[in-house]
Amino acid sequence: MPGCIPYPIYKQLQPQTRVRVVDPAGAPLAGASVTLVANTYPYGREHHRETLATGAAGEVVFSARREWRAETLFIHGAQVFVWRLCIAKPGYATHLTLPEGAADFDADATIALQPGATVPCPPPG
């Protein structure tokens, strides 16, 4: 069956991502926890997550992750990565983005946190 032959691919597991966290007035927020979560589809499983804290400029930068893999096309297609951000800081409402693929993910985001209840980011799973 031709579709079952593995092929090499240099897969992007995580794009280089810069996130700037600000308050409603646009001032940088130091000490915010920014989590970048990578999920894979078609199964929707979490592949990995990384959490960084913003510095005085309210920014974090996640390094890109890529790796060589052998993939096989099955009926469901190849493995696709999607990413989402979760930003939390005490005194501000936790901000959680929707999962987005390479074409739509904002890898240079500015997020304005609003005052409110802080809840933990969803647990791994």
Image (cartoon, rainbow, N blue to C red):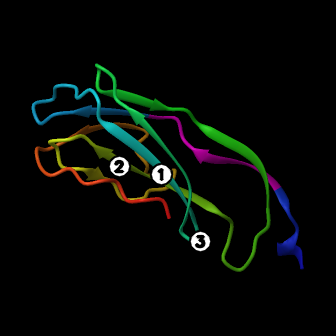
**Quadrant in the rendering for residue 119:** bottom left
Amino acid type, residue under disc 1 in the picture: Val
Instruction: Kindly identify the amino acid type of the residue bearing the numbered disc 3.
Output: Pro
Residue that label 2 marks:
86
The reply to whether callout 1 and callout 2 are in contact (CB within 8 Å) is yes
Point out the frontmost of discs 3 and 2: 2
Q: Between marks 1 and 2, how big is the CA–CA gap?
A: 8 Å
> What mark, if any, has residue 37 been given in the picture?
1
Mark sitting earlier along the chain (1/2)? 1
Element type at mark 3 = loop
Marks 1 and 3, how far apart at CA: 16 Å
Image mark count: 3
Depth check: give the residue in front, 121 or 65.
Answer: 121
Q: Is residue 50 magenta?
A: no
Q: Nearer the viewer, residue 47 or 124?
A: 124
Q: Determine the residue positioned at 67% across, 42% down.
A: 66
Which segment did they paint magenta?
8-17
Residue name at image x 34 percent, y 27 percent? 59
Q: Amino acid at mark 2?
A: Cys
Q: Is residue 8 above or below residue 33?
A: below
Please tell me whether mark 2 sits on a helix, a strand or a loop. strand
Mark 3 or 2, nearer chain start: 3
Return the residue at label 3.
Answer: 42
Tell me the quarter of the picture where residue 75 sits. Answer: bottom right
Q: Are marks 1 and 3 in contact (CB under 8 Å)?
A: no
Precedes in sequence: disc 1 or disc 3: 1
Q: Residues within 10 Å of mark 3 (few under 14, many from 20)?
A: few
Residue 9 within the segment the image draws in magenta: yes
- Mark 1 or 3: the one toward you: 1
Residue drawn at x 20%, y 50% is 118
Left/right placement of residue 95 relative to residue 48 reads left
